[in-house]
């Protein structure tokens, strides 16, 4: 019997170079070269998508603006979601400072970490070269590129989900207790990122039931150990949920749309399926391209593709997220939303390569990477230019061309002109508040929609001591009528001075000049005791 691997061996299992001895295909002559290539490609994707969008966009996407606001305080939970992404953003802002680019780079770093882990997982049952082809295919799923311009709970979940599945795989093959414990740790952290992580965890349980080689005492004890660690990780958040009457679940219930009948249910399923197919289409085109190029390639030996047990693992991990999501919608009668597929395709490339035998040559790798890089360039240029350059040319408003820096400058200047003290609290919707946080040199707390339960770090006493800049978005009829505005209206009514900013923001060519601006009404609640202001 081989000795159980040490924790250091597990760390080496994650590192592509130079520790190739940790996986079965270390003897391949191109293993180290492929590992360095993975790192280079990951860096390239971050530079292309993260830095590219960070330099071109004038403002973060809406979900990123939300994270900028939530990251002010390390809470055990937030009113819509569990806390881990906001913790990550808090740390990033503490290290690098706030900026619009930070959200784009952070998102892409998470995506490429997930892709690197899936590549490393593939090295357990196929060659590093074949696994890299699989990872390049996975990168073409639009959730991992076009959808990677927003730091939200779905994109933040990707690396945690990939790491959980990888550690679970290692634990089932090697049986070491520390691997089971690490799998439970990552499973708990995944749930602290987004509750939908339970779908992937359920898929792992399905696999454990189907793989009869795991039906023995040691494996069951390992699963129990993982579950125990999982519960320990979740305990503080579970206590917070009880204390707040399960705020995120009440929010989820409020936005869920029930199916109104059989026809509505069928339409929801068909629409969801078509949208997922569309988002898979770049990857499917790449698979088709490789298959046409591989017809003349020699059939590879059995070592290039997974054995039956590993094939079962891949099938379950790749298919169960969509199947379980569909099952949830059907059983609960909830209308499917397209974004529910955002974490379902992390292992799609590995499954594709497990089913193909003729795509494992150096030539095929070069062609796969050329296709993937070209596709990324087209998608990146198309999205970034479409939301910025072309949007400006055709006078179309997008989040990307909103003048966020100008808004922050006006907010700071107006506040200081009327109070003589630094701006510490902004009461606004999440979009305006997040833009000010992203573009402010000092820490600014956002009282979201004027509600303390959405921003428990801003108390009524803090507003009295520190004062607050109240903002009301009047850029369009829709924004002026959106959401529950009573709390913000009440704060605005108590402002000692009010005014309006007109921010240059694209609008319709046919619209009057006044409608081609972003209109923001502002009001100042003057600080009563700046010396006692605790918003630091």
Image (cartoon, grey):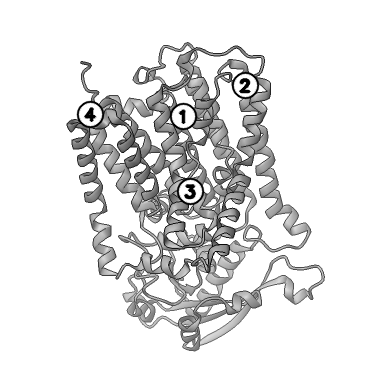
The foreground one among 178 and 466 is: 178
For mark 3, give the secondary structure.
Answer: helix
Neighbor class of circle 2 (other Cα within 10 Å; few <14, some 14-19, many 20+) is few
Mark 1 to mark 4: distance in Å? 22 Å
Which x, y percent locates residue 40? Answer: 53, 28
Sequence-first disc among 1 and 4:
1
Above or below 385: residue 210: above
Marks 3,1: beta carbons within 8 A: no
**Distance from label 4 to label 2 (Cα)?**
37 Å
Nearer the observer, 411 or 18 = 18
Observer-nearest of 271 and 484: 271
Q: Considering only order in the chain, which callout, 2 or 4, is on the residue closer to the N terminus? A: 4
Circle count: 4
State yes or no: discs 2 and 1 in contact (Cβ < 8 Å).
no
User: Which of marks 3 and 4 precedes in the sequence?
Assistant: 3
- Residue receiving disc 3: 155
Q: Are marks 1 and 4 in contact (CB under 8 Å)?
A: no
**Measured Cα–Cα span from mark 3 to mark 1:** 18 Å
Q: Earlier in the sequence, mark 2 or mark 1?
A: 1
Residue at point 74% right, 58% down?
A: 392
Q: Does the image show residue 172?
A: yes
Q: Give the residue pinned by disc 1.
A: 119
Determine which residue is flagged by label 2.
366
**Element type at mark 1:** helix
Give the image location of residue 36, x and y in percent: 49, 23
Residue that mark 4 sits on: 176
Q: Position of residue 343 (x, y in %)?
A: 47, 46
Q: Is there CB contact under 8 Å for labels 4 and 2?
A: no
């Amino acid at each position: 019997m081989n000795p159980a691997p040490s924790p250091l061996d597990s760390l080496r299992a994650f590192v592509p170079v130079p520790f190739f001895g940790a996986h079965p295909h270390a003897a391949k002559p191109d293993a180290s070269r492929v590992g360095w290539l993975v790192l280079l490609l990951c860096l390239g994707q971050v530079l292309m998508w993260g830095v590219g969008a960070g330099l071109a966009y004038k403002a973060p996407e809406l979900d990123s603006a939300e994270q900028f606001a939530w990251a002010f305080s390390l809470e055990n939970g937030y009113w819509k979601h569990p806390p881990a992404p906001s913790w990550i953003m808090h740390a990033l802002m503490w290290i690098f400072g706030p900026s619009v680019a930070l959200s784009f780079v952070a998102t892409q770093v998470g995506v490429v970490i997930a892709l690197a882990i899936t590549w490393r997982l593939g090295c357990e049952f196929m060659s590093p070269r074949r696994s890299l082809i699989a990872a390049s295919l996975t990168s073409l799923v639009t959730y991992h590129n076009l959808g990677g311009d927003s730091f939200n709970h779905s994109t933040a979940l990707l690396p945690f989900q990939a790491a959980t599945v990888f550690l679970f795989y290692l634990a089932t093959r090697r049986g070491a207790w520390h691997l089971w414990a690490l799998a439970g740790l990552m499973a708990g952290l995944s749930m602290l990122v987004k509750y939908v992580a339970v779908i992937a965890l359920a898929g792992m349980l399905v696999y454990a039931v189907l793989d009869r080689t795991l039906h023995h005492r040691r494996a069951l004890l390992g699963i129990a150990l993982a579950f125990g660690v999982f519960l320990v990780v979740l305990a503080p958040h579970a206590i917070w949920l009880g204390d707040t009457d399960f705020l995120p679940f009440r929010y989820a219930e409020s936005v869920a749309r029930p199916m109104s009948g059989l026809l509505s249910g069928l339409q929801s399923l068909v629409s969801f399926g078509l949208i997922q197919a569309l988002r898979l289409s770049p990857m499917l085109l790449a698979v088709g391209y490789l298959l046409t190029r591989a017809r003349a390639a020699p059939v590879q030996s059995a070592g290039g593709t997974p054995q039956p047990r590993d094939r079962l693992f891949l099938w379950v991990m790749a298919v169960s997220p969509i199947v379980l999501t569909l099952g949830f919608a059907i059983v609960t009668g909830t209308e499917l939303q397209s974004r529910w597929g955002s974490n379902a395709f992390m292992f799609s490339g590995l499954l594709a390569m497990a089913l193909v035998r003729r795509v494992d040559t150096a030539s095929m790798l070069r062609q796969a990477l050329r296709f993937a890089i070209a596709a990324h360039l087209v998608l990146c240029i198309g999205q970034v230019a479409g939301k910025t350059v072309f949007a400006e040319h055709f006078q179309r408003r997008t989040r990307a061309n909103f003048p966020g820096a100008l808004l922050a400058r006006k907010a700071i200047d107006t506040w200081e002109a009327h109070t003589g003290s630094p701006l510490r609290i902004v009461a606004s919707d999440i979009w305006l508040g997040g833009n000010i946080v992203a573009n402010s040199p000092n820490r600014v707390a956002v009282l979201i929609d004027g509600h303390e339960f959405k921003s428990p770090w801003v108390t009524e006493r803090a507003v009295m001591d520190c004062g607050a800049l109240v903002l009301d978005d009047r850029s369009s009829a829709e924004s002026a009528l959106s959401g529950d505005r009573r709390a913000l209206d009440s704060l605005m009514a108590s402002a000692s001075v009010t005014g309006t900013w007109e921010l240059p923001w694209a609008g319709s060519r046919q619209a009057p000049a006044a409608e081609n601006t972003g209109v923001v009404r502002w009001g100042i609640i003057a600080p009563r005791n700046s010396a006692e202001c605790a918003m630091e």
